[in-house]
Image (cartoon, helix red, strand yellow):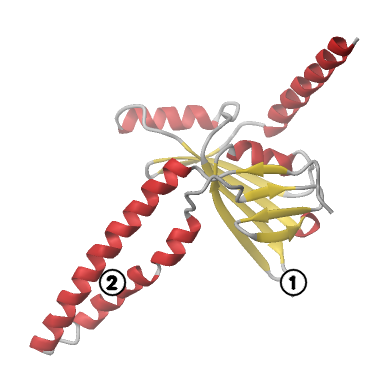
């Protein structure tokens, strides 16, 4: 049965295109290096080069996975319904979800010191909306094991809040800027309370318009 209240979240096409290009460039470089290493090993008989060749081949082999994880079509990759959530094609029962996590990707505002101050300030404030970030759903499988599914999506805070407001899972929100990372120190319940107040106000305005 179709869930009319299902919330859909999309990949960032622009972000994924850049990520794909990086993987493709690295793979091309890897192929060139692997050919060079093969020739070098054949000519010198130095087996130490095999270790280096292994990592190069591994990088190339992971290219299809990297392309799959960075879709460039504007179609939903995360959907959140009342009974089920889907992350990158994996359907998960809401009752099996044990934790959710989100990492908001922030853009640089200046030098390393300015970026660090901005990161720490943002982590202490109300979460920004309409942001790109990684979204994780951790759940219990049929055999009782814990497993996670990931996706990089637009509106990551909004997707995150769909689980937090239900109050049945543990949750963690963080921010990333370059190589720096900070856990959010903001009380997310305040964010949910503000959102609920906005929704209530919007609903009252619609009633007034109808009257």
Residue lying at the far right in this picture: please name it.
Answer: 211
Where is mark 1, residue-wise? Answer: 144
Q: Are marks 2 and 1 in contact (CB under 8 Å)?
A: no
Q: Quadrant of the N terminus?
A: bottom right
Seen in the picture, residue 146 relative to 152 is either above or below; the reply is below
Q: Is residue 34 left or right of residue 132?
A: left
Image spot of residue 120 (x, y percent): 47, 31
| Residue at the (64%, 49%) spot, across then down | 78
Task: Give the Cα separation between the discs numbered 2 and 1.
Answer: 36 Å
- Image quarter for residue 203? top right
Closest to the camera, between mark 2 and mark 1, is 2
Q: Is residue 167 left or right of residue 12?
A: right
Image spot of residue 23 (x, y percent): 34, 58
- Image quarter for residue 145? bottom right
Where is mark 2, residue-wise? Answer: 56
Q: Secondary structure at mark 1?
A: loop
Q: Is residue 175 left or right of residue 19?
A: right
Rate crowding at label 2 as few (under 14), some (14 to 19) or many (20 or more) other CA atoms within 10 Å.
Answer: many
Q: Secondary structure at mark 2?
A: helix
| Residue at the (38%, 72%) spot, across then down | 61
| Residue at the (44%, 59%) spot, across then down | 67
Image spot of residue 207 (x, y percent): 87, 15
Q: Quadrant of the C terminus?
A: top right
Rate crowding at label 1 as few (under 14), some (14 to 19) or many (20 or more) other CA atoms within 10 Å.
Answer: few
Looking at marks 2 and 1 on the same chain, the residue that comes earlier in the sequence is marked by 2
* Numbered-mark total: 2
Seen in the picture, residue 191 relative to 17 is either above or below; the reply is above
């Amino acid at each position: 049965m179709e869930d009319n209240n299902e919330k859909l979240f999309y990949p960032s096409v622009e972000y994924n295109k850049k990520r794909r290009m990086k993987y493709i460039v690295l793979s091309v470089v890897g192929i060139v290096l692997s050919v060079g290493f093969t020739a070098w090993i054949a000519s010198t008989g130095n087996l130490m080069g095999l270790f280096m060749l292994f990592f190069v081949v591994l990088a190339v082999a992971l290219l299809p996975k990297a392309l799959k994880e960075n879709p460039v079509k504007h179609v939903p990759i995360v959907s959140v319904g009342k009974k089920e959530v889907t992350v990158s094609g994996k359907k998960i029962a809401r009752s099996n979800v044990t934790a959710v996590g989100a990492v908001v990707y922030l853009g640089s505002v200046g030098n390393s010191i300015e970026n660090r101050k901005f990161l720490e300030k943002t982590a202490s404030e109300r979460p920004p909306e309409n942001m790109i970030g990684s979204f994780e759903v951790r759940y219990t499988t049929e055999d009782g094991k814990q497993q996670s599914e990931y996706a990089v999506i637009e509106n990551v805070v909004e997707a995150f809040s769909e689980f937090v407001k239900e109050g049945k899972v543990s949750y963690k929100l963080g921010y990333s800027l370059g190589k720096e990372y900070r856990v959010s120190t903001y009380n997310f319940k305040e964010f949910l309370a503000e959102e609920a107040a906005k929704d209530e106000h919007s609903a009252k305005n619609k009633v007034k318009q109808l009257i």
